[in-house]
Amino acid sequence: DAGVTQSPTHLIKTRGQQVTLRCSPKSGHDTVSWYQQALGQGPQFIFQYYEEEERQRGNFPDRFSGHQFPNYSSELNVNALLLGDSALYLCASSLARGAGYTGELFFGEGSRLTVL
Amino acid sequence: AQSVTQLGSHVSVSEGALVLLRCNYSSSVPPYLFWYVQYPNQGLQLLLKYTTGATLVKGINGFEAEFKKSETSFHLTKPSAHMSDAAEYFCAVSEGYSTLTFGKGTMLLVSP
């Protein structure tokens, strides 16, 4: 049973560029969340996708956008990159509320973005 | 709004000693509580969780935590530390829709 997979694992961009990060959820999961983890900090919630729509959003600017596809996989896009966007971006999958819901998130190993 | 406070950014113990990592939360509704562990350059792995029912929950690798509503705490313990426990530990709270609010983390250092 494949867990949550993310790509790429590492990437380097320059200020002003755009980046796309990809995530495939754990088999059977229908909800994907994205978190940003800056160095030495805990993960911070960016947004969550369910049924191909953004369901909840954290305190992140509109430069951060996402998408969920019919197969539940997801992309995170960041435009006009800033130095402060350098971080580990974590994707997490879960089941929506209902049968089997536990509130538990399963995390991928992350995509480490460095902005120069 | 929910929040998590982890007391101590670093905790040092000797191998074989008791591990105690502290977590206090605030939540406007009965919370779901979690402890995750992160090894260097890796994602987060769930150690244990509290949703409802028994307030003492047991997790993987010999860790356990007790939910104390009156103290709004969910401290993580392990009776005897092992070198392989050295990692960063995150406490998190959820009020619904599977979104987690994390603490800033506690780095556990284990010395021989």
Image (tube, coloured by chain):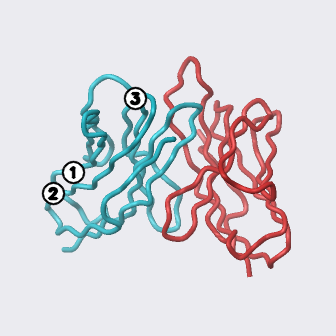
Going by the numbered disc 2, the residue's amino acid type is Leu
Q: Element under label 1?
A: strand
> Disc 1 sits on a residue from what chain?
B
Residue B78's disc number:
1
Chain A, chosen colour in render: red
Q: Quadrant of residue A1?
A: top right
Q: Position of residue A106 (x, y in %)?
A: 55, 43
Asked whether disc 1 touches disc 2, contact meaning CB atoms under 8 Å apart, the reply is yes
* Neighbourhood count class around disc 1 (C-alpha, 10 Å): few under 14, some 14–19, many 20 upward: some
Q: Secondary structure at mark 2?
A: loop
Q: Could you say which quadrant of the image residue B69 lies in?
A: top left
Q: Which mark is residue B51?
A: 3
**Residue at horizontal 60 percent and vertical 29 percent from the top:** A95
Quick one: A99 or B55, which is closer to the camera?
B55
Q: Nearer the viewer, mark 1 or mark 3?
A: 3
The residue nearer to you, when weighing A53 against A61, is A61
Q: CA distance from mark 1 to mark 2?
A: 6 Å
Are there few (<14), some (14-19), or many (20+) residues within 10 Å of tag 3?
some
In the depicted structure, whether residue B92 falls above or below residue B52 = below
Left or right, B46 with respect to B72, comes to: right
Q: Say whether disc 3 or disc 2 marks the residue closer to the N-terminus.
A: 2
